[in-house]
Amino acid sequence: MSSFFQEEDPTPPNPRSYEAFGPKPESLAEIAEKAKLDHGENSFEYASALVKLGDAHMVQGRLANPRAQECYETALQIVQKTDNSLAETAFVLDKLATVKHSSGDTAGAATDLKSAMELWQLLEAEARFVTDTYISRRAEDLERMEKVVAFENIRPPEL
């Protein structure tokens, strides 16, 4: 498995930094900054920490979506610069599609999810971080998103 999912410090430094739904974004932000200092701003470790931070923001609710999206976009830029990181790129694109869809950007979500699906098609099953069942569910999601986008783009008839 990719080093993208291996954590240097799996738990936040303070047990009080946990909430009912996982670590607080503040504690994960500290871990992300530490990863950035220790490994560099273009490292898989930093990108992985940003994905976890984005996930924590997503748990906070819709108002935190812009911060989650920012984390995922930065992580995506990092993994796209790395050779042989198709699985990681697809993973982050899927996360980005989720946050965009949750924020109401169905067209952007469909674009990102379609890119992730294309990358998953290129990879062997063992190289992906997701199962075939997950991919088929996301394909259904993509189909629904594309129908919504097509409907939103329909112009009313001229009167």
Image: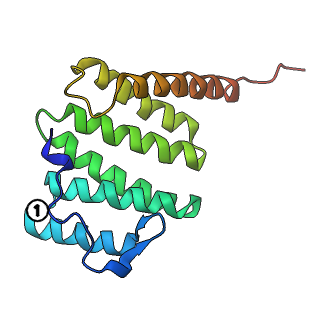
Which amino acid lies under the numbered mark 1 shown in the image of this protein?
Answer: Gly
Question: Seen from this angle, which residue lies furthest right?
Answer: 159
Q: How is the image coloured?
A: rainbow
Mark 1, Cα crowd under 10 Å, few <14 / some 14-19 / many 20+, is: some
Residue 129 left/right relative to 22: left
Between 128 and 86, the one nearer to me in the picture: 128
The image shows residue 130, relative to residue 49, as above or below, that is above
Residue 122 in the image, given as x and y percentages of width and height: 24, 18
How many numbered marks appear? 1
Residue lying at 56% horizontally and 42% vertically, measured from the top left: 105
Residue 79 left/right relative to 51: left
The image shows residue 130, relative to residue 67, as above or below, that is above
Helix or strand or loop: what does disc 1 sit on?
loop
Residue 66 in the image, given as x and y percentages of width and height: 48, 59
Residue 65 in the image, given as x and y percentages of width and height: 51, 57
- Residue 91 sits in quarter: top left
Residue lying at 58% horizontally and 58% vertically, measured from the top left: 62
Tell me the quadrant of the picture where the C terminus can be found.
top right
Residue lying at 24% horizontally and 77% vertically, measured from the top left: 13
The residue identified by callout 1 is 40
Residue lying at 23% horizontally and 33% vertically, measured from the top left: 87
The image shows residue 57, relative to residue 117, as above or below, that is below
Residue 38 left/right relative to 24: left
Tell me the quadrant of the picture where the N terminus can be found.
top left
